Image (spheres, rainbow, N blue to C red):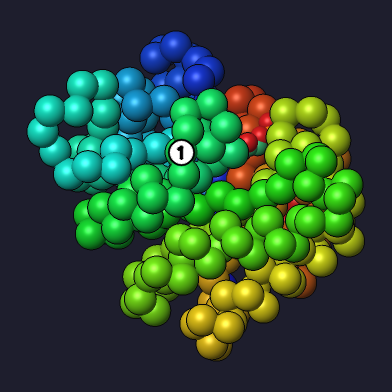
Amino acid sequence: MRKKIVAGNWKMNTLLGEGVELSKGVAAGLAAVPSDVKLVIAPPFTHLYAVADAIKGTSVSLGAQNCADQKSGAYTGEVSAAMLRSVNCEFVILGHSERREYYGENNDTLNRKMQLALENGLSPIFCVGEKLEEREAGRHFDVVGEQLRSVLFNLTAEQMASVVVAYEPVWAIGTGKTATASQAQEIHAFIRKTLREKFGALADEISILYGGSCKPSNAGELFSQPDIDGGLIGGASLKAGDFLEIAKSY
Ligand code: PGA
């Protein structure tokens, strides 16, 4: 059985005190979340150490939003995968469309980041998704297929077993527009089929999360689809109540 995961991507939001409070709020509401749903929170780098402490002893897992594409050394401003692991991160979001779009992240950097994350025992949450014009041109399957092949197809099966995939249509991120449950299911099934080409039956063990304006009012319908194994939540993860409500809608 593949894992059900609800992950909160806080992006560049909250100051330290607010982030610690938010993480405590999530931990405090855990009892009402089905025990087979794994909660992950991914605060900004500056908060990781304190949030790790705030969620210690609970089943909430810590994630980071990015990591360096180099191991260590003279890379001013970067944070390595080993550093993330040293503050108890278990997950790292890689290839988010905002990183691809605003920070020039490409397949080369992503291939290096994936290797470093995996070498350091982190589970990458690898994001894929098409832009609006690509969907309108009917190219979404090609775009997503290419994003998968260029990075995930370079992994061994053993490495792939630690990866979580997130499908996030760029046109739905932070826009209030959500893919319909059937649009999301269609492409999640395509992602699984593509992974099957390279990894065979392992593809059925990989969690594929939906992201893009996922909120309490639409999460239940999205999560009821056979190939949707949870969500990567941006805006709605900034309120503990909403984030927990999403997780409870399983
Ligand atoms: P959103 O962001 O939920 O605010 O649309 C999702 C994401 O980018 O991970």
Instruction: Name which residue type carries label 1.
Output: Glu
Q: Compared to 45, does 196 lie above or below?
A: below
> Label 1: which residue?
105
Q: Quadrant of residue 212?
A: top right
Residue 247 visible in the displayed image: no
**Residue occupying the point 29% across, 42% down:** 69
The image shows residue 88 at horizontal and vertical percentages of 26, 43
Q: Residues within 10 Å of mark 1 (few under 14, many from 20)?
A: some
Q: Compared to 205, does 59 lie above or below?
A: above
Q: Compared to 237, does 15 lie above or below?
A: above
- Mark 1 C-beta closer than 8 Å to ligand 1: no
**Residue occupying the point 49% across, 82% down:** 199
Q: Quadrant of residue 205?
A: bottom right
Quarter occupied by the C terminus: bottom right
Front-lying residue, 96 or 134: 134
The image shows residue 38 at horizontal and vertical percentages of 52, 55
The image shows residue 85 at horizontal and vertical percentages of 24, 45
Q: Quadrant of residue 5?
A: bottom right
Secondary structure of the residue carrying tag 1 is: loop
**Residue occupying the point 30% across, 25% down:** 50
Residue 109 visible in the displayed image: yes
| Quarter of the image where ligand 1 sits | top right
Give left or right: position of 21 versus 226: left
Front-lying residue, 75 or 18: 75
Front-lying residue, 43 or 31: 43
Give left or right: position of 175 versus 92: right
In the rendered image, the residue lying farthest to the bottom is 201
Quarter occupied by the N terminus: bottom right
**Residue occupying the point 46% across, 61% down:** 151
The image shows residue 211 at horizontal and vertical percentages of 68, 45
Instruction: Give the total of numbered labels.
Output: 1
